[in-house]
Image (tube, helix red, strand yellow):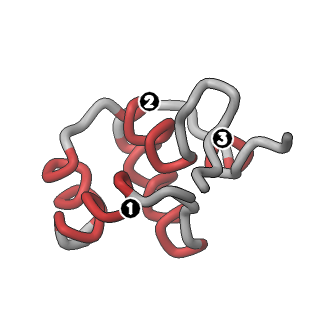
Amino acid sequence: MQRLGKDGRTPWRKVHEKIGLSAAELARAMGRHRSKISRALGDDDGLISGRDQLLLMKVARERGIALSADEMMPERR
């Protein structure tokens, strides 16, 4: 069962789209392996770990993108 938001996207997918990098570029910017990012984007839950939340906020900040912790949480139904 997928736990998608109202718009059909998981937290990982929403943040990935907002940052606007390819999975490989995002992985490089985060210092993570690209397969980890690909798995996260394809995961049914798409939940973002605390460590990855910090890395994503850093990547967004470096690119002048406003990203809050709330945007990385699943939507409540």
> What's the amino acid at mark 2?
Lys
> What's the amino acid at mark 3?
Glu
Which quadrant is home to the C terminus? Answer: top right
Q: Which residue is mark 2?
A: 18
The percent coordinates of residue 30 (x first, y second) are: 30, 62
Asked which quadrant contains residue 58, the reply is bottom left
Mark 3: which secondary structure? helix
x 66%, y 41%: residue: 71
Q: Earlier in the sequence, mark 3 or mark 2?
A: 2
Mark 2: which secondary structure? helix
Please tell me which residue lies in front, 8 or 57.
8
Report the mark closest to the observer, 3 or 1: 1
x 43%, y 60%: residue: 43
Q: Earlier in the sequence, mark 2 or mark 1?
A: 2
Q: Which residue is mark 3?
A: 71
Judge from the rendering whether residue 53 lies leftward or rightward of residue 27; answer left or right: right
The percent coordinates of residue 75 (x first, y second) are: 76, 42
| Count of picture labels | 3
Q: Is residue 64 visible?
A: no
> What's the amino acid at mark 1?
Ala
Disc 3 to disc 1, how far (Cα)?
A: 16 Å
Please tell me which residue lies in front, 14 or 21.
14
Judge from the rendering whether residue 17 lies leftward or rightward of residue 2; answer left or right: left
x 58%, y 51%: residue: 2
Q: Which residue is mark 1?
A: 40
Please tell me which residue lies in front, 6 or 63.
6
Which quadrant is home to the N terminus? Answer: bottom right
